[in-house]
Structures are given as structure tokens and as C-alpha cells.
Image (tube, coloured by chain):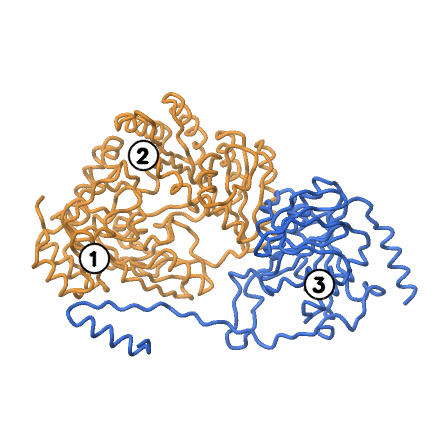
Chain colours: A blue, B orange
């Protein structure tokens, strides 16, 4: 165990980043408009729609890349998910991310937001030095908005959620506008974490050249063992989760109905129809 | 004006389709009178009309028998998305609205849809999708109806690879002006029995028969697609790249051409941003394939062509939402320009001549000191040139510009309309730019099908 820790620290030292370093957290989610739900079992049929970067995370990537363009440095994208999530990390590379890491292991599966944020925080500790972590405000499949702030809590760094504008950016701090219903101007010193809303920017389209290059780029895949020394195995996956999803209920669609009433008898027919529906 | 609608007609129509399905009276018929034709060229609709909504072929037949007997004009109406006034009633008569006939079924084994005339393009696309099949062309507005799409032989953005509406229709059921029902073709790939009257009815703009049902060919899905924006510094550079792309064997689903000003106007109207910051002229290319690896090999090839053609940096949307956003901005250009537009042309030249056509359009713009926004289906040589309002100009100048655009199109071996058709507004141009024998033969054909001239009078024929 000790040896492992030493080796891991050695890796970190070799890959150490001295420039401005932004880590962006992304999630591979199903295309929410195409995905089909099994009403009987209350499950999402993930094979029914291709996976892609969670739409809110595109704004996180754009934020990170814009900061890199202004302040220099590098952007690392980190995701936890099944092997298919590699395609989302490649997309992140095409959008300007320099290094992509996928945490993928069946031991991570079934994680709730607590176990997920713990696992991500552990990987961030392994990555080493960073200035800023950027996340989307929430994911379209989970819709909790909890993972980002929880990661910050695990790491013991300040965080600002629902950032809708980066007002000023410096090498050691950001001044941002946080939209919590009312807007707050917040200065946050690095290392810090922010979660961004759709209003923060318009994500750019990747170039054809970058897309083709990203297809040949390397995505690092880390399993649970590669986090040894940074992680407590009892706090990951289903085992480390304090909440469980028992069932997903899909509300049934109700179509609007209409009747056309004509003639002298209309009022009586209308009253009768309303009575039949139990409105009067 | 002479009225063909009296109490007896309304009563007879009511007895055919039911009282609730007959609409008449000023105000009540208003929603059935117009289409998308720009206001300056649109004919004034006749309001002395009765709207009738049949639910079956038998009812359509009975309506036409009545109209034929009483010599009442019948104006077939689909989704009202046409651009040449094709469904606008120009005389007192019946507006035949097929919206209640909207069933679509799919025969998966034969890969064929059976669609009633009032089903929308959207209904057809959805029905194909539910059967895990695909209707490849995208011939315009998704609320256009099948009957109208076939009657007007709609084109759209994907003709470059998959052809126009007539390439997909394998059979139709149509009601003749006499009320007789004709069934032509079927779920067939081959049919060589005599004159192809089905193809004659397709594109006849409701002047020969009322299409009530069609068999439409479907294809396996193309699950992997991307939309690319290739920016250029000039119109000419963009358009001259198109034949180069097609010569390499790349078969895009669509090759669209747009320009910065109209596309930015359209994006702003939608509250969106055009994603390409550089360049003045753009090709939007949609690639769709069965196999992901193959798709990206095509991309590599396309990048080479772009470099050789001196394009700026091409951008790519892989995600569905990003692809949809680009196409939405593209498809709303017409609506965005419409308030200041006089006319939208749809001239078509041999695909390789499109660069030359645009050079000529540029010359016309310069000589009138105006801007003629152009966008359209560059891959199939079909470009929408817009004539815009100018302060102090009268109809004569707009007509002159239109005729000049038509003349240069014909010089390049083209035609005045590639997809919108003749309708009401292009009849004078049809007469001017077509051979008299062709016009004469068309009139004779009309006479055979519709001796009483009740079907969509004042349309198509000069």
C-alpha cells in the first residue's frame, strides 16, 4: 500500500502542472429528447439514444477554455462513467480541453451524488495542483445540481454555484455573478470551484480539424485501483451511497380534448359535459 | 363578382361531409385563404368561398361530382406552406381542405408508407421513425401536407443525395374532376404499364386531379450524422467548391449555401448566434451514414477539398441539439427576410454552373445598386435569390430584376423554378420563358383531365 502511494505521488510529480490549471467536470448523459423510458419498469433505456456531454457541461468547458485563452495554462476534463463516456471526453478535447481522464470501473457503478462527488474529489487529489474546478449547474438526467458543490466540500475549497457571468478573471481569483434567483457579485480566490449556468456563455462549435484530431487523441482511463492512496473503497459506488433510486415514474401524457357545440341545445350539452367530467 | 356558392351548394356539401365540416362566411374562412407567398406578389384572395373538409376518398369524390356538375371552382388546400399562391382562391368556389384525411401506416417489409393526403410531413417522418425507417428527403416545412407535397413535387435541402418528392412516390390514389377515382402504381419499385400518368399528376399543382392517398418509399435509417459549416470569403469561392466536393464521390445529405447578413438576421430573430465568426459565405453540409468510421473518413476527405478550395476553418456540429440549432437558423431565413422582401425566386441551373450563376446575380445586384440575398440548395443547383424592397422603386423595377435573373438562368441551361412551382405568381414568367408548343401541350392535357376547368383555376397555366 505504501509503495503504491509513493508511485502515485511520483506520477503526479511527473505530470505536475505549474501553469494556470482548470479542471472541468463533465458527465456523459443520454440525449434526453431521444431517450426512451420504459413506463412498466420505470427505467431509462440507455441504448435508445446516443450518449453525449451533458448540455450544461458544454458551458463549463467553454468557461474553462476561455479562461485558458486569457490566462494561459491547461484544461483537464474529468468524468466518471461507463467506457462509452470516452466519446464525450473526445468531444471535450475537440472543444479545447488538453487532457481527458475517465474514471471507469464497475466498482464506481450505482453511485449517488455523495459517492460520485467523493470519487471525483479523490481523482482530483490524484491529479494534483489546480487553480479552478468548473462544472455545469446540473445534469439533464440527474437534475440535482449537487455534485459540483459536494466535490468542493470534499476538497475543502470555496465554491460558487449558478455562475451566470464571469465578470473579471485573474491568475489568483475570479469575480463572478451568481444567479440564485437574485444576483450576487462574488469574489472567489483559487483554488475554488464554480458551477455555471447556460447564460454564462455560448459554447463554440469545434472545428473539423479538432474533431478529427480528437478522434486520435488519448483518453486516460483510471479504475478504482489507480486511485489507491487517495480513496477509501467503502465510500464509492453503490456501497458508498447514502441514497438509492427505487423507481422512476414517468407522468403519462394527457391530450387536450375538445367538443364543438352548436345550436339552441348547446348550453345544456355543455353543462352535461362538464358534469360528466366531474367539474360541476 | 359572380358567386358560385349558394344555399343549395352549402346544403349539398353539408350532406356529404356533415354540417360541422363546412365553413363559410366572411371572417370564418379567413384562415383558409392564404399561403406563405410574400405580400407584394400575393394575389388578393376571393372571400366568397366555402371550406369543406372531407374525411374519405368517397367524400372527395362526391364533392367533385357536385362541383363538376355545377361548374364550381375547387381550390385544393394542404398545409398552406406554398410560396407562389398555389392554393389561394382567386374566384368564388370551394376550398377543399384535406386535413382530416391524415392517417399514415407503414409496411415495414416493403419499406413503404401509405399516407393520406392530409397527413403532414412531420406525421410521415414520425411514422417512419417509429418503424425504425427513414424518409430521406426533407421537402420543406414539416407542416406541409402529403397531398400538397406531391401535387407540388416539393424539393427541399436533401435533393442532392436523395432526390425530390417524385422520386419517392410509388403509387397514388387520385380523384378526377368528374369524381372518378383513379389508382396508379402501388407498393412497387417497377411499373412500366403505359403512360406514366402518376408522374404527370405529381407536380400538376392540383390542376389535374385531387391526390387523396400515396404510397411513399422509405429507407433504412442513417444513424450517424454531422452538420458542418464551411466558411469562405466570397460567394463565388463557396459555390465553386460544391462541384469539387461532389466529384470526389462524397454524397452529402444536403449542401446548403448561406450568406452572413441573412443568416445573422435569422439567428438574431431566434435569439441565437450564428456560430461561425469568420467568412462571408458559407456551405452547410449534412453528412449521414450507416457507419461511424466511414462518416469520419468522409470528413477527412472533405477537409482536404476545403483546404484545396481555400476555405476558412470548417466547424462541425456532432450533437443533435447543435445540429438542430444550425438548421433552425437556416430554415428561418425566409421568415426573417419576409417583412422586407418582394419576391423569393427558386431558379435552378446545372449544379456545376451555380458559381457562374452567382457571378451573374452579383452583376445584376451591382447594376441596380441593390443587395439580392441568396441562399439555397447549392448541391442541386437550386438557389433562392431574394428581391428586397428598395425606397422609391416600383413594380416595374422588381419585374425587370426578376426577368434578368430568369434570363441569366436560362442562358446557363436552367429553369425559372426548381421547387416552388408556377402557382399563381409565375404564370407570366412561364409563358415568357417556355416554348409555345410546351404551353400548348400542357393546355391540351388540362383540357382532357378537366374540361370544365374547375380544378385550381388561374394556377400553373398562363
Q: Are the residues under badges 3 and 2 in a single subunit?
A: no
The secondary structure type at the circle numbered 3 is helix
Residue name at image x 73 percent, y 42 percent: A170
Using a 10 Å C-alpha cutoff, classify the residue at mark 1 as few (fewer than 14 neighbours), some (14 to 19) or many (20 or more). many
Q: Nearer the viewer, residue B347 or A184?
A: A184
Q: Chain of mark 1?
A: B
Q: Can residue A88 be seen?
A: no
Does residue B210 appear in this view?
yes
Left or right of residue B123, residue A230 in this image:
right
Residue pictured at 19% horizontal, 56% vertical: B51
In the image, residue B29 sits, relative to residue A247, either above or below, namely above
Q: Position of residue B119 (x, y in %)?
A: 32, 59
**To which quarter of the image does residue B262 belong?**
top left
Q: Earlier in the sequence, mark 1 or mark 2?
A: 1
Q: Could you tell me which residue is drawn at 67 percent across and 70 percent down?
A: A112
Where residue B53 appears, x then y in whole percent? 22, 60
Could you tell me residue B78's position as x and y percent?
A: 28, 53
Residue at image mark 3: A150
Q: Cα distance, mark 1 to mark 3? A: 68 Å
Q: Which mark is residue B175?
A: 1
Res B117 → quadrant: bottom left
- Quadrant where the C terminus of chain B sits is top left
Categorize mark 3 by other alpha carbons within 10 Å: few (<14), some (14-19), many (20+).
many
Which residue bears the numbered disc 2? B342
Amino acid at each position: 500500500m505504501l509503495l503504491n502511494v509513493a508511485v502515485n505521488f511520483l506520477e503526479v510529480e511527473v505530470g505536475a502542472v505549474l501553469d494556470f490549471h482548470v479542471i472541468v467536470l463533465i458527465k456523459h448523459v443520454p440525449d434526453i429528447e431521444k431517450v426512451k423510458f420504459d413506463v412498466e419498469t420505470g427505467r431509462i433505456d440507455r441504448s435508445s439514444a446516443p450518449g453525449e456531454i451533458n448540455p450544461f457541461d458544454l458551458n463549463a468547458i467553454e468557461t474553462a477554455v476561455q479562461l485558458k485563452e486569457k490566462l494561459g495554462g491547461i484544461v483537464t476534463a474529468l468524468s466518471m462513467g461507463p467506457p462509452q463516456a470516452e466519446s464525450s471526453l473526445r468531444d471535450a478535447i475537440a472543444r479545447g480541453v488538453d487532457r481527458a481522464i475517465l474514471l471507469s470501473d464497475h466498482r464506481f457503478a450505482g453511485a449517488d451524488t455523495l459517492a460520485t462527488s467523493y470519487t471525483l474529489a479523490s481523482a482530483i487529489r490524484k491529479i494534483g495542483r489546480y487553480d479552478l474546478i468548473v462544472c455545469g449547474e446540473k445534469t439533464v438526467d440527474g437534475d440535482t445540481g449537487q455534485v459540483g458543490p459536494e466535490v468542493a466540500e470534499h476538497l475543502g475549497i470555496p465554491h460558487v454555484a449558478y455562475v451566470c457571468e464571469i465578470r473579471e478573471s485573474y491568475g489568483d481569483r475570479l469575480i463572478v455573478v451568481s444567479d440564485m434567483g437574485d444576483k450576487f457579485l462574488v469574489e472567489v480566490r483559487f483554488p475554488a470551484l464554480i458551477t455555471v449556468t447556460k447564460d454564462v456563455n455560448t459554447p463554440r462549435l469545434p472545428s473539423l480539424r479538432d474533431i478529427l484530431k480528437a478522434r486520435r487523441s488519448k483518453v486516460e482511463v483510471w479504475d478504482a485501483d489507480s486511485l489507491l492512496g487517495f480513496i477509501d473503497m467503502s465510500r464509492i459506488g453503490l456501497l458508498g451511497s447514502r441514497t438509492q433510486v427505487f423507481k422512476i415514474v414517468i407522468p403519462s401524457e394527457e391530450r387536450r380534448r375538445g367538443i364543438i357545440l352548436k345550436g339552441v341545445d348547446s348550453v345544456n350539452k355543455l353543462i352535461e359535459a362538464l358534469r360528466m367530467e366531474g367539474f360541476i | 363578382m359572380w358567386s358560385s356558392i349558394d344555399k343549395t351548394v352549402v346544403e349539398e356539401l353539408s350532406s356529404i361531409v356533415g354540417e360541422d365540416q363546412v365553413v363559410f362566411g366572411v371572417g370564418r374562412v379567413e384562415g383558409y385563404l392564404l399561403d406563405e407567398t410574400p405580400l407584394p406578389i400575393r394575389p388578393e384572395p376571393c372571400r366568397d368561398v366555402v371550406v369543406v373538409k372531407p374525411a374519405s376518398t368517397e367524400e372527395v369524390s362526391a364533392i367533385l361530382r357536385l362541383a363538376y356538375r355545377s361548374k364550381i371552382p375547387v381550390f385544393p388546400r394542404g398545409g398552406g406552406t406554398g410560396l407562389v399562391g398555389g392554393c389561394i382562391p382567386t374566384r368564388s368556389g370551394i376550398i377543399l381542405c384535406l386535413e382530416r384525411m391524415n392517417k399514415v401506416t407503414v409496411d415495414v417489409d416493403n419499406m413503404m408508407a401509405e399516407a393520406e393526403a392530409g397527413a403532414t410531413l412531420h406525421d410521415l417522418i414520425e411514422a417512419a421513425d417509429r418503424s425504425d425507417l427513414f424518409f430521406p428527403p426533407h421537402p420543406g416545412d414539416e407542416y406541409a401536407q402529403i397531398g400538397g407535397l406531391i401535387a407540388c413535387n416539393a424539393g427541399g435541402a436533401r435533393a442532392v443525395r436523395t432526390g425530390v418528392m417524385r422520386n419517392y412516390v410509388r403509387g397514388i390514389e387520385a380523384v378526377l374532376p368528374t369524381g372518378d377515382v383513379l389508382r396508379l402504381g402501388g407498393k412497387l419499385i417497377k411499373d412500366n404499364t403505359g403512360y406514366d400518368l402518376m408522374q404527370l399528376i405529381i407536380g400538376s399543382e392540383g390542376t389535374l386531379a385531387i391526390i387523396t392517398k400515396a404510397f411513399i418509399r422509405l429507407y433504412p435509417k442513417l444513424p450517424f450524422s454531422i452538420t458542418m459549416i464551411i466558411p469562405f470569403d466570397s460567394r463565388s469561392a463557396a459555390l465553386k467548391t460544391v462541384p469539387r466536393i461532389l466529384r470526389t464521390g462524397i454524397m452529402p445529405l444536403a449542401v446548403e449555401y448561406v450568406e452572413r447578413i441573412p443568416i445573422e438576421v435569422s439567428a438574431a430573430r431566434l435569439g441565437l448566434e450564428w456560430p461561425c465568426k469568420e467568412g462571408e459565405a458559407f456551405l452547410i453540409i449534412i453528412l449521414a451514414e450507416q457507419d461511424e468510421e466511414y462518416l469520419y473518413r468522409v470528413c477527412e476527405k472533405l477537409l482536404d477539398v476545403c483546404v484545396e478550395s481555400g476555405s476558412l476553418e470548417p466547424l462541425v456540429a456532432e450533437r443533435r441539439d447543435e445540429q438542430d440549432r444550425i438548421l433552425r437558423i437556416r430554415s428561418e431565413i425566409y421568415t426573417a427576410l419576409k417583412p422586407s422582401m418582394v419576391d423569393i425566386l427558386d431558379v435552378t441551373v446545372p449544379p456545376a454552373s451555380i458559381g457562374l450563376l452567382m457571378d451573374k446575380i452579383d452583376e445584376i445586384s451591382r447594376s441596380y445598386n441593390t443587395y439580392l440575398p441568396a441562399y439555397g440548395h447549392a448541391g442541386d443547383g437550386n438557389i433562392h435569390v431574394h428581391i428586397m424592397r428598395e425606397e422609391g422603386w416600383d413594380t416595374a423595377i422588381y419585374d425587370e430584376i426578376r426577368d434578368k435573373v430568369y434570363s441569366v438562368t436560362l442562358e446557363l441551361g436552367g429553369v425559372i423554378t426548381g421547387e416552388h412551382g408556377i402557382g399563381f405568381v409565375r404564370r407570366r414568367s412561364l409563358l415568357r420563358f417556355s416554348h409555345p408548343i410546351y404551353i400548348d401541350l400542357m393546355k391540351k392535357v388540362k383540357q382532357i383531365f378537366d374540361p370544365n376547368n374547375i380544378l385550381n383555376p388561374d394556377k400553373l397555366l398562363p
